[in-house]
Amino acid sequence: MVVTKPFESVAKFNARAEGLSDISLVVIQLTSIPLPQEIAATNLGDKVAEQIKVGFSATFLDSSTQNAEDSREPLFFKGETYPRALAEMEKFFLQHGWSDGFPLIPPTEEAVNEMCRGTDLPPDFVVGEVEPGRGKATVEKIAVNAAMAGCLPTYMPLIIAAVQAITDPLFDLRGVQVTTGMVSPFLLVSGRTLIRDIGLNDSFSSIGPGWRANSTIGRAIRLIMMNVGHSWPGKTDMKGFGSPFKFVMLFAENEDAYRDFWEPIRITEGFNREHCTISAMPAVTWQTIRIRTDMATPDKILEIISHQGKAKSDKYADNWGLDNLIIVSPTVYHVFLKATMTRVEMQQRLCDLITIPAHEFFFEKEPSADINLVTPLPEWLVQRGLQDSNALVPLISGPEKLKICVAGAPGTGMVAYVSTWGLGPSHFATKEIKVPACWESLSKKYCDWASPTIREET
């Protein structure tokens, strides 16, 4: 393998993951991919060629950072007082890269066993394989991380379904984990009954503090991505800035607001009304738009949203064929409700509006079907660019690629445009949430942990 200096550790890690721990590695002592003129000026090509020759006759074994095998030996932390013992645990977990930096709840055997009551699956059942380390996300390991995050056992069905979503090949977790791009999972829960049962906030300030379920479920997913997936900044996680999304945001669909006109998003994703689901969106940005609904028409609102869609496009057309998410507040939704505009009509109208000139779309490159490595461009789009550099081409490959739902609270008209990244085949993935047979008694036991939620009267 040939890599630049910042990617040396991730190259070694990926080699081990592929069973190639003895592969030779050529490290170019530069911080980024060199420009063609830099390669020529420094005679870099010949230098690298010489290193490659040496590499073919030598092997490399990175034994210093081999992943330790799982150990079931319990850890003990002592102190003169409980807070001091807890502090020792916190320091140990931080030093081993097992913490997200926030205070942790000790994952004692009792706490993990109680967490496992939130599912009928056995503790050793493998829910998914977490990239890039390909760690086996067993129910027990999920429970350990959920306990550390401060979750309640009633959150386990959502966490398990979320792990299924992010480990689905459709989501491309490896790309999301190791890329330099600022992408991270954004979770969306659909299912009014379950939302009520566990106390998820689906109303005012639903992305914000105050609700244990919203805060800790997302945190548990991040800990699982780190501890089971072996993802760590500078080792396998190569994001330059990172993102607040890396704490994993959790949103709940406001089903009451639909007034039986639009269907919940779980139905549009192929599930039945009686199901509850969680969707994982590979999100890069979250841009909110304030709408004056007392003066706006559906056409005006769609025009405003389309501007955001164009602004979030990638010049290299890398986002083409991928999914974007649009969240509208109940107040904005009521404008479409009064105009009897369906979700399908809204998707199609936006798809028609979110266009840019071909010369911007291809960004000084010859129009070709293979400029996009994720989704090959259709021939008609390439021909349009070849025939007229000013012709408008769509940034969204089809209406179904715009996911739209209602969330949040009424009052101020708000829209959020959540865009995806463009350097990996990562899509919107939805899984059913399955509660255990003891759900009624379990949810009753933990019902007093819910924060008060003020919702719109229906």
Image (cartoon, rainbow, N blue to C red):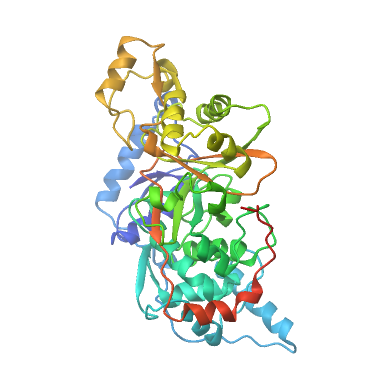
Question: For residue 389, which quarter of the picture?
Answer: top left
Q: Total number of numbered labels? A: 0
Question: For residue 432, which quarter of the picture?
Answer: bottom left
Question: For residue 286, which quarter of the picture?
Answer: top right
Residue lying at 25% horizontally and 23% vertically, measured from the top left: 379
Q: Please say if 344 is above or below 137.
A: above
Q: Please say if 107 is above or below 417.
A: below
The picture places residue 418, in percent across and down from the top left corner, at 53, 41
Q: Please say if 162 is above or below 379.
A: below
Kindly tell me whether residue 202 is visible in this rendering: yes
Q: Please say if 221 is above or below 253.
A: below
* Closer to us: 257 or 444: 257
Residue lying at 35% horizontally and 10% vertically, measured from the top left: 388
The picture places residue 132, in percent across and down from the top left corner, at 39, 58
Residue lying at 59% horizontally and 62% vertically, measured from the top left: 200
The picture places residue 124, in percent across and down from the top left corner, at 36, 79
* Closer to us: 393 or 220: 393
* Closer to us: 375 or 394: 394
The picture places residue 438, in percent across and down from the top left corner, at 46, 81
Relative side of 283 to 335, left or right: left
Kindly tell me whether residue 8 is visible in this rendering: no
